[in-house]
Image (cartoon, helix red, strand yellow):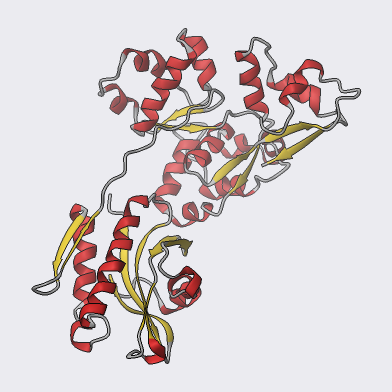
């Protein structure tokens, strides 16, 4: 997948201030957008010679601002930055060494031969940006001959993925079609686990009904996660509350995503709901609004919408998130929680308490936690 969207050469103009001198593709970033982020592109001295990454306008901007001090320049300094632009949702950590290396190449070229300040050689920068963009996008590396003494070598080294963390209370949900999954060769544990992944069973429950040791199931789920066969989402309960994220703007603009969404959340596969109704339900989510309350107010079924799949789709696409409740016991005096109070320290949410208590041999189900804490004046709840 091509993560790189644009490469910009920015500089400080003594008359006009921070400017995009060149970019490829041309006019990808507007002057107005540049004006909004210019303090992070052409920076104050404290941030110069540091890798800076910021998100704006649905993009990630990554640069390494450089200042070369010399009396030959106007205002005694040349300030520039070559900025790589990516989609805001992409993980682009592997580009960090490339951005820093390119900045250092250009700094050396300027110090040795005025490559950036000489009008003759500066005119080559658009071609350099174009080659960097095209070669890194196509093959992850590029070689640019500058002159008989200097050549720029850049290569994106793909970083190994870290094994994802699998919590017992997390719920695996498929990202691949059933036929695509069945066509792959998995180990025996994965084959034991796969039939019980339905988007609603959490890891601990899968281990129980599959009759497989919990640690082995965690490992199998971790393997499926690593290969991006599944995603992990929070356990669905009607008492849960969810909140929309800024990323919801993506589905409001993407017609293809809207079609996928209405197909996914439909109560009857043959009758897709109206996207306007689906979007209205997402916008009705918020702190203090449980799924049960949402259903009472708006009745998703009347729109042909499955509320469980509505929540599931939003979590998978990462434009809603679950608001977890963390109980904190303020005083042990006159509490009705008894021995269960050891879980109420603010570090565990309801689902974690339930799963950890089962693992410790002292089952404390979700409804029991609500009953024990909701009306206890000694228990404070934090939602986040």
- Displayed quadrant of residue 362: top right
Task: Report the residue that reaches farthest toward the top.
Answer: 211
Query: Residue at position x 31%, y 68% from top?
Result: 103
The front one of 233 and 279 is 233
Can residue 355 be seen here? The reply is yes
Position of residue 179 in the picture relative to residue 39 (left or right): left
Q: Position of residue 219 (x, y in %)?
A: 41, 21
The front one of 40 and 32 is 40
Can residue 196 be seen here? The reply is no
Position of residue 265 in the picture relative to residue 375 (left or right): left
* Residue 61 against residue 168 in the figure, above or below: below
* Residue 326 against residue 69 in the figure, above or below: above
Query: Residue at position x 47%, y 31% from top?
Result: 165
Position of residue 223 in the picture relative to residue 264 (left or right): left
- Displayed quadrant of residue 365: top right
Q: Position of residue 370 (x, y in %)?
A: 76, 25
Task: Report the residue that reaches farthest toward the left.
Answer: 148
Query: Residue at position x 19%, y 56% from top?
Result: 141
Quarter holding the C terminus?
top right
The front one of 69 and 78 is 69
Label count reads 0
Query: Residue at position x 39%, y 20% from top?
Result: 220
Q: Position of residue 222 (x, y in %)?
A: 41, 26
* Residue 177 against residue 261 in the figure, above or below: above
Q: Position of residue 296 (x, y in %)?
A: 72, 36
* Residue 257 against residue 144 in the figure, above or below: above
């Amino acid at each position: 997948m091509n993560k790189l969207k644009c490469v910009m050469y920015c500089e400080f103009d003594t008359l006009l201030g921070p400017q995009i001198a060149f970019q490829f593709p041309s006019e990808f970033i507007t002057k107005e957008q540049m004006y909004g982020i210019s303090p992070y592109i052409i920076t104050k001295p404290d941030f110069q010679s540091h890798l800076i990454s910021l998100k704006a306008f649905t993009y990630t901007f990554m640069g390494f601002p450089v200042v070369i001090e010399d009396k030959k320049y106007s205002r005694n300094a040349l300030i520039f930055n070559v900025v790589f632009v990516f989609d805001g949702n992409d993980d682009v950590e592997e580009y960090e060494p490339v951005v820093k290396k390119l900045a250092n190449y250009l700094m050396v070229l300027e110090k040795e031969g005025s490559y950036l300040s000489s009008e003759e050689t500066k005119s080559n920068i658009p071609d350099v940006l174009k080659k960097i963009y095209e070669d890194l996008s196509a093959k992850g590396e590029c070689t640019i001959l500058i002159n008989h003494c200097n050549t720029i070598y850049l290569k994106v080294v793909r970083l190994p993925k870290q094994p994802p963390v699998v919590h017992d209370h997390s719920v695996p949900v498929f990202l691949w079609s059933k036929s695509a999954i069945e066509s792959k060769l998995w180990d025996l544990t994965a084959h034991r686990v796969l039939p019980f992944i339905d988007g609603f069973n959490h890891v601990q429950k899968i281990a129980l009904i599959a009759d497989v040791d919990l640690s082995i199931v965690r490992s199998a789920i971790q393997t499926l996660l690593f290969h991006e066969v599944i995603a992990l989402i929070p356990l669905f309960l009607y008492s849960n509350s969810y909140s929309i994220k800024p990323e919801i703007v993506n589905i409001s603009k993407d017609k293809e995503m809207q079609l996928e969404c209405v197909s996914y959340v439909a109560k009857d596969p043959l009758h897709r709901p109206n996207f306007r109704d689906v979007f209205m339900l997402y916008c009705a989510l918020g702190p203090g609004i449980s799924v049960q309350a949402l259903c009472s107010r708006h009745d998703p079924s009347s729109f042909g919408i499955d509320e469980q799949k509505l929540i599931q789709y939003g979590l998978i696409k990462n434009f809603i998130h679950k608001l977890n409740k963390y109980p904190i016991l303020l005083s042990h005096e006159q509490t009705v929680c008894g021995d269960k109070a050891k879980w109420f320290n603010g570090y565990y949410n309801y689902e974690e308490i339930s799963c950890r208590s089962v693992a410790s041999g002292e089952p404390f189900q979700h409804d029991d936690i609500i009953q024990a804490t909701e009306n206890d004046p000694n228990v404070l709840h934090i939602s986040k």
